[in-house]
Amino acid sequence: MAVTIKDVAREAGVSIATVSKIINGAPGISEATTRRVEEVMRALDYAPNSRAASLARKSARCVAFLAELDEAAPYTNPHLFDIMCGVQTALFSKGYALTLLDSLSADVEKMILSRAFDGIIVHGGALTRPIASLLIARRFPHIVIGHPSDVRLNWVDTDHTLGGRIACEHLIDCGCERLAFMGEGETAGISNQRLTGFRTALLEAGLEYRRDWVLHTDGTLASGKGAALELLGRGELPQGIVCGSNLLAYAFTLAAAERGVAIPGDMLLITFDRYPYSGLISPEPTLVQIDVRDMGRAAAKQLLQGLKKPELRVQSYTTLPSLIEGQSTRKL
């Protein structure tokens, strides 16, 4: 027998009206009461429907986008705006509205429980274990942008391993045999995927993969420049380097200028994406470009398909990286 709102009210020791207010996000309910009712809803596996207006048309015609929206977001996640633009374009064409949710908001779980929207797109950086568990337990329509560790989640991503391979193969095609890599730390997922592609391309070409030429940084300008200065001060230089982000590439060029190392005269350099720092790099860098706006469109389209077919599993690389040649690489 299905659990009703009356069962929730009785178990939580509150009135039906109070449960209804909490489900609909009405003000005037204490935090303690709200928390107790939500815990009971989870324990009883009670999944309330959305609001009356949504019930009348059987759809909220609204999709949520969950991301970290703090003041540092434009710097820590510069692609977020382009991804959201892609999502909005795809949703608008199908008559859906987009609602932004801050991952720091305590209302996120409540809104999922109340089905205040038809589905949710979660930026990988905002995915927490409680949110992931809730999406899975409620079978709530969702797409994660980025490859999550939980195999039960639906996701889309770009193939970062392929991106690392493309970057390395381009330097090899230019004639490089001694190659270095600078990334964002041994625990950084995207950076490690790019390093995997880099290493694979090197070994397949019969070239040496030198661990002492793999530079791990914390992803900042200062850390990148420090690592680059240390590498460039050793004596033997690599012929080329793959920088795992354009910020690190910018840091490397600053260090190279200090050491009197010319790019591409003494070393070739390749990095990823135009935005936000590639415009500061001189000479114009060769890039492995990822169309993140297209990835946003793909995420929205896959989610809308999932609304029509709830049994659909989406786990795919939807956006392939491409090479854009600049002035930082040349034939040796």
Image (cartoon, grey):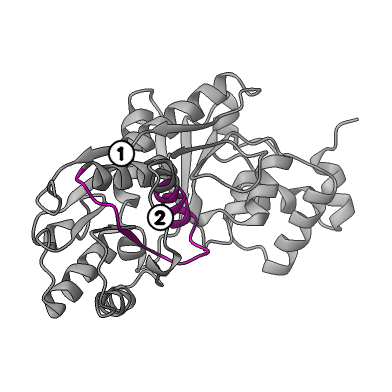
**Above or below: residue 289 compared with residue 285:** above
Q: Secondary structure at mark 2?
A: loop
User: The residue under label 2 is which amino acid type?
Assistant: Glu
Q: Is residue 180 magenta?
A: yes
User: The residue under label 1 is which amino acid type?
Assistant: Arg
**Residue 39, horizontal then vertical, whole percent:** 78, 56
Q: Tell me: 208 left or right of 268.
A: right
* Residue at the image position 54 percent from the left and 35 percent from the top: 119
Magenta segment boundaries in residue numbering? 174-199
Comes first in the chain, label 2 or label 1:
2
Q: The N terminus lies in which quarter of the figure?
A: top right
Q: Which residue is mark 2?
A: 208
Q: Is residue 184 magenta?
A: yes
> Residue 109 versus residue 146: which sits nearer the camera?
146
Q: Which residue is mark 1?
A: 293
Q: Nearer the viewer, mark 2 or mark 1?
A: 2
**Above or below: residue 186 compared with residue 139:** below
Q: Quadrant of residue 205?
A: top left
Real-space Cα separation, disc 2 to disc 1, in angstroms? 36 Å
**Residue 232, horizontal then vertical, whole percent:** 24, 75
